[in-house]
């Protein structure tokens, strides 16, 4: 299966209730994650996570869809053309 390089940007609007679900889901896709950065912004009870991924478009779509279904989580992704 062909893979593509890309990124997934995740904003968690309520760290206390959603972060554990997000981290659990991300760990299920660890094989295709090249890098992960996370910044908690405690003053606003928000966290921002950026993933650099090398996955098939189906895997990226499934991951972002599942993340987007978690209450209080916003997700955007971008893919290389190759």
Image: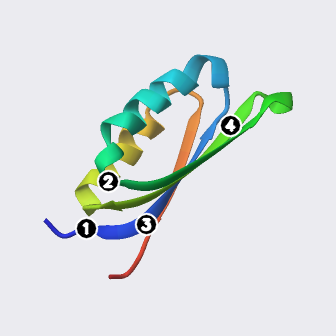
- The residue at 32%/82% (across/down) is 82
Please provide percent x and percent y for residue 32: 32, 53
Mark 2: give few (<14), some (14-19) or many (20+) Cα within 10 Å.
some
Mark 1: give few (<14), some (14-19) or many (20+) Cα within 10 Å.
some
Residue contact at pointers 2 and 1, CB within 8 angstroms: yes
| Cα distance in 3D space between marks 2 and 1 | 9 Å
| Cα distance in 3D space between marks 2 and 3 | 10 Å
Q: Which residue is mark 3?
A: 6
Mark 3: give few (<14), some (14-19) or many (20+) Cα within 10 Å.
some
Q: Which residue is mark 2?
A: 32
- The residue at 67%/32% (across/down) is 13
Residue contact at pointers 2 and 3, CB within 8 angstroms: no
Q: Is residue 46 above or below residue 58?
A: above
Q: Which mark is residue 3?
A: 1
Please provide percent x and percent y for residue 33: 39, 53
Displayed quadrant of residue 26: top left
**Labels 2 and 1: the sequence-earlier one:** 1
Residue 53 lies left or right of residue 36; in this view the side is left
- The residue at 59%/29% (across/down) is 72
Foreground mark, 2 or 3?
2
| Cα distance in 3D space between marks 4 and 2 | 22 Å
Question: Please, what secondary structure does the residue beneath circle 4 have?
Answer: strand
Q: Which mark is residue 47?
A: 4
**Labels 4 and 2: the sequence-earlier one:** 2
């Amino acid at each position: 299966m062909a893979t593509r390089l890309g990124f997934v940007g995740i904003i968690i609007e309520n760290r206390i209730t959603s972060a554990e679900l997000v981290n659990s889901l991300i760990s299920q896709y660890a094989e295709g994650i090249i890098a992960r950065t996370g910044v908690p912004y405690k003053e606003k009870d928000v966290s921002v996570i950026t993933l650099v991924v090398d996955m098939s478009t189906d895997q990226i779509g499934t991951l972002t869809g599942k993340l987007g279904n978690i209450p209080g989580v916003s997700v955007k992704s971008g893919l290389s053309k190759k």
